[in-house]
Amino acid sequence: MSEVEFNRQVGEARRRGARSLKKGPRALSAEFKNGRVTVDLYGGWSFSFDPRKYKVFKNASDEQLAEVKPLGLGFALEWESIDQHLGVASLIIDLIGRGFLMSEIARRNGMVTSQKKKAASQANGKLGGRPKKTHNKRAA
């Protein structure tokens, strides 16, 4: 790899890293108390969860679970003595529910308007619009 290409890739990696620091959910702190891990995020949000919901923590003691702390820049949580790590973004997606999250993203994306969507809608209207719903009613 040339020095020019190496420098280009380093620059791109730094830009991606800077974007991640601004946009990605990162843990500021984490605490295990009363059977739950509470995570405070940069930006003021927080969430909590029962770590024993995850198979890797089923047999962990309260003392081991209390060792939780943010790892590195806060993109993951770490339990050092039991060598376990959970990504913060993955936890949030798991807790919210992947199905709900995907349907919400699709709903919001469907609300976006653009010239392309407007033109497609107008073209569809010239063809008679959406087909009417038919109800197949059976006589009783």
Image: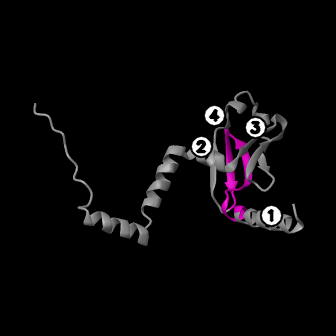
Evaluate if marks 1 and 2 touch, with contact meaning CB atoms under 8 Å apart: no
Q: Which mark is residue 94?
A: 2
Q: Which mark is residue 65?
A: 3
Question: Which mark is first along the chain, 4 or 3?
Answer: 4
Question: Which mark is first along the chain, 1 or 4?
Answer: 1
Q: Which residue is mark 4?
A: 53
> Where does the image place residue 124, in percent across and percent down from the top left?
30, 63
Relative to residue 96, is residue 14 depicted above or below? below
* Secondary element at image label 3: helix
Pointer 2: residues within 10 angstroms few (<14), some, or many (20+)? few
Q: Which mark is residue 9?
A: 1
Look at 78% across and 47% down and name the residue there.
69
- Amino acid bearing label 1: Gln
Determine the image quadrant of residue 21. Answer: bottom right
Is label 4 or label 2 in front?
2
Residue 104, visible in the rendered structure:
yes
Q: CA distance from mark 3 to mark 4?
A: 13 Å
**In the rendered structure, does residue 21 fall within the stretch colored magenta?**
yes
> Where does the image place residue 134, in percent across and percent down from the top left?
20, 46
Q: Which residues are magenta?
A: 20-42
Q: CA distance from mark 3 to mark 2?
A: 19 Å
Evaluate if marks 4 and 2 touch, with contact meaning CB atoms under 8 Å apart: no
Question: Which mark is first along the chain, 3 or 1?
Answer: 1
- Amino acid bearing label 2: Asp
Q: Which mark is residue 78?
A: none
Q: CA distance from mark 4 to mark 1?
A: 40 Å
Q: CA distance from mark 1 to mark 3?
A: 39 Å
**Which image quarter is the N terminus in?**
bottom right
